[in-house]
Amino acid sequence: MAFQTKPEDLVIAAVSAKEPTVILNNVIGSAEGVIKRALAKERRLLAFVSGYSISGTKKGLVGLAGDYEVTFSYAEDAPENIGDVVLDNHDFDPESVLGTDEPKKLVIVGSDPNEIHRKLSDRLFYFLARYEGLFGYELNTTQFQGISPDYRIDIGYSYFAPLAQMRTYMSKASFAAKGIWRKLLGRSNPPAFVKAFLAFSYLNQCCGYDDDAFDDAVDNPKAPPAGPGPGLAYGPLVENRGICGGIAWAYKRLMDEAGIPCQCVSGYLTADTRAAHAWNLVRIEGQYYHVDATPGVKNDGVLVEYFMRSDNEFRKHHSWDEALYPRATGMRYQYDFVEDFLADHGGDYLDDGADDAIMFPENIVD
């Protein structure tokens, strides 16, 4: 016994394949009702359709059935496949936007865009610390009122500069980091904890704090910076100027080039909450340490109080969402240990061309 395919299933198949038209024969009721049932059965169809038109006639003496041709128009940015659409049943996880090099652009079908906005907003600080140059996210919604209670929700992102320009900044910063390491190390190859200090000492001594860029960030917190350089690794590494975000990204870039695991942290300085603050977590021999090069950039000397510190020590002057980051429990490789090590071995590194002023700063501030 043959079973006739339900008209709503024909619509689902046609829209999933982005076919321009679908023929519906012997439909009881309206074609709009068929489309409505199709969108209720496969809610993700909403991500594809931008509009439709219906032509057809009723049949029979009482006109209970009809033959229709439905023509669909599809959104230019419709996903390739229906499986690319995220269906939200009030279980959206902000972690789903995390990608390797940049956050994922998602197309979501759900009934509550405000809930998704709230969840993303709660995690924005973490996203900013994960992706260099990310300024914020953008939520765009569309809906067919009367046909579906759902929304198509597009998640996109804004950056300090257009992405092509961002990639240029990052490429130049990476090239500069390689050159800086050649200058700092010569032919020497000290252990990771020494390299962590050399990068810290270099930024403290060779980078200036950009007060104008900081004032712009405080005065215009909802707008991307007029000049993006100081907030990116590019500023400290290429132009020798930056603010906390750029300094943290510059330190990470130097650690990346040295093969040392490092990430940026977003939080606040407890003494100044006018604007968010950024610093780093670096991992040496399996243990994490906090490193904040910005105070040394803002002041004279190499401020080792902010070099390779534990959570307990950093809580005195920094605050952050500790649930989002690994615990920093390392205590061994603080500056006193590095200083003693370099007293014994630093001469060998200098003989191999290491930079004397960076390895042995004249002005160490505890």
Image (cartoon, rainbow, N blue to C red):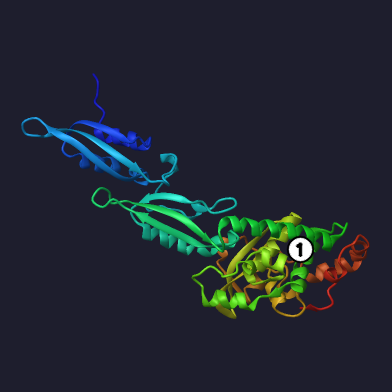
Q: Residues within 10 Å of mark 1 (few under 14, many from 20)?
A: many
Can residue 363 be seen? Answer: yes
- Kindly identify the residue that appears in the image at 15 percent across and 38 percent down: 29
| Image-based side of 252 in relation to 320, left or right | right
58 or 107: which is nearer to us? Answer: 58
Which quarter shows the C terminus?
Answer: bottom right
**Would you place residue 130 above or below residue 83 in this image?**
below
| Image-based side of 128 in relation to 26, left or right | right
Residue 215 point in image, percent of width and height:
58, 78
**Would you place residue 80 above or below residue 214 in this image?**
above
Residue type marked 1 = Ala
Mark 1 — residue? 196
Residue 68 point in image, percent of width and height:
21, 34
- Kindly identify the residue that appears in the image at 84 percent across and 59 percent down: 190
SS at badge 1: helix
**Would you place residue 354 above or below residue 59 in this image?**
below
The mark tally for this picture is 1
- Kindly identify the residue that appears in the image at 76 percent across and 56 percent down: 258
| Image-based side of 359 in relation to 131, left or right | right
| Image-based side of 198 in relation to 93, left or right | right
Image quadrant in which you'd find residue 26 = top left
